[in-house]
Amino acid sequence: MDKSNPASVGLCGDLDEIAAIDEIEAIFGVTLDYADAPSWQTAGDVFRSLLNVLPADVANASDTWDRFAAALTHETGVDPATITPNSPLLDEALPWRGLGNLSRMMAMLLIASAAILVLLVLVLR
């Protein structure tokens, strides 16, 4: 794995990040401090927040990172073995990345409307 370009966790900002955090909390039986959430950019950022709420014996267990990575990637299907602390949470390569849900919906409606218009023109000829 290229450490300068780690694999993304694959989240895309369509509420799958909520499911990923829920999965982590369920697996470890804790609630993360959501005040930290604005600073969560990488898997390591979330992991540090997890370590802050875990009992010391669980935080220091040899399998804690592996369990965390599996929970974090459960929603996306990314291989947890490819995730490092530097892995970005969001997948910048996704075509709709950066658009809000409303913008995404409006774009899809525009594309669908154009397709329907083309079909009507073809049928009415």
Image (cartoon, rainbow, N blue to C red):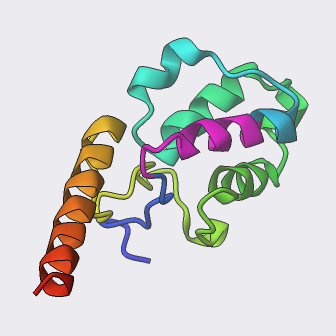
- For image coordinates 44% across by 67% down, the residue present is 7
- Is 104 included in the stretch rendered in magenta? no
The picture quadrant where one finds residue 2 is bottom left
- For image coordinates 65% across by 36% down, the residue present is 21
Position of 124 relative to 58 (above/below): below
At which x and y percent is residue 65? 71, 51
Position of 10 relative to 38 (above/below): below
Q: Is residue 10 left or right of residue 98?
A: right
Dominant SS of magenta comes to helix
Position of 50 relative to 82 (above/below): above
The picture quadrant where one finds residue 34 is top right
Q: Quadrant of the N terminus?
A: bottom left
- Is 14 included in the stretch rendered in magenta? yes
Q: Magenta segment, which residues?
A: 12-24
Q: Is residue 50 left or right of residue 64?
A: left
- For image coordinates 29% across by 57% down, the residue present is 92
